[in-house]
Amino acid sequence: MRTILLQADGSGTGPAVIELSPGQEITFGRGTASAPVDFLLNHPGISRRAGIIQAVEDYWLLTNLSHDSTLVVENPEGGGEFLKVAPRRAAAPVPFEFARVVLPVAGGACSFLVFASQHSFIDPDAPETSATGEPTVSGFPLDETAKYFLVLVALCESRLRDCASSVIPTVPEVLERLREVPGCAGLTRAAVNFHIDYLARTKLRVKPSSGSRKADWQRAALVSVALRFDLVREEHLKRLST
């Protein structure tokens, strides 16, 4: 059976871990002696009953019981993704496998971790269920064995290693990063520029915002699209290993 785990995040929370089966729910907050909560957040700035978490297979629902405080759910393993749950919002679905729930308090924040079950995916080798009609066209047809994909991985590396990073590598930095990668010794600056332009025009089809400079917007737009749609993931960083 799939389960959801809640774990303390070093912010004065307890108990250390709670396990929920699908359909089960818990309350979290500061609680009172007469009305305790299931997951204690021992901070004077937290509401007595701050919210409810309900387990649903490989995701979970978050209810914000506060009348004036927004809850933020971060994806620590992603590209900076987060969602906000407004005051009094009921049963907001959270899609992250690993998440940090952040509650605002004076002088900082109080948080705890939630681990959902591993998400299920359709077998990529399975045939499509429809026996007739044209096959589905991929939205972003990337060849992970191609050099342009290595260029894309190098562009995304800083954000993959640190989701808070705003660094977008320059063309010379991409060239230097790939120089020692097998098969890339002969890569030139012009070739890297070509691959970036090819990705922008043909593969990811990104478009500039008004007034932006080509040298800047293409690289930034490619990183944004690649990470937003999981086209480049942490597992791809091993492709940059020498």
Image (cartoon, grey):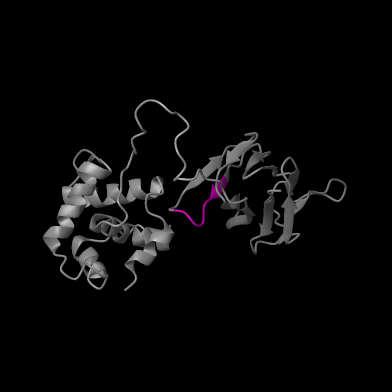
**For the view shown, which residue lies furthest in the top direction?**
133
Residue 53 or 178: which is nearer the viewer? 178
Asked whether the viewer can see residue 41, the reply is no
Q: How many marks?
A: 0
**For the view shown, which residue lies furthest in the right direction?**
34
On screen, residue 118 versus residue 237, left or right, reads: right
User: Up-down: is 205 above or below 231?
Assistant: above
Residue 62 or 36: which is nearer the viewer? 62
Residue plotted at (49% across, 45% down): 123
Q: Quadrant of residue 153?
A: bottom left
Which span of residues is magenta-colored?
Answer: 72-78
Residue plotted at (32% across, 42% down): 140
On screen, residue 128 versus residue 177, left or right, reads: right
Residue plotted at (64% across, 61% down): 9
Asked whether the viewer can see residue 55, the reply is yes
Residue 111: image x %, image y %? Answer: 62, 55
Residue plotted at (44% across, 52% down): 80
**For the view shown, which residue lies furthest in the front direction?**
131
On screen, residue 83 versus residue 133, left or right, reads: right
Q: Quadrant of residue 26?
A: top right
On screen, residue 61 versus residue 184, left or right, reads: right
Q: Quadrant of the C terminus?
A: bottom left
Q: Is residue 68 magenta?
A: no
User: Up-down: is 2 above or below 153?
Assistant: above
User: Up-down: is 229 above or below 11?
Assistant: above
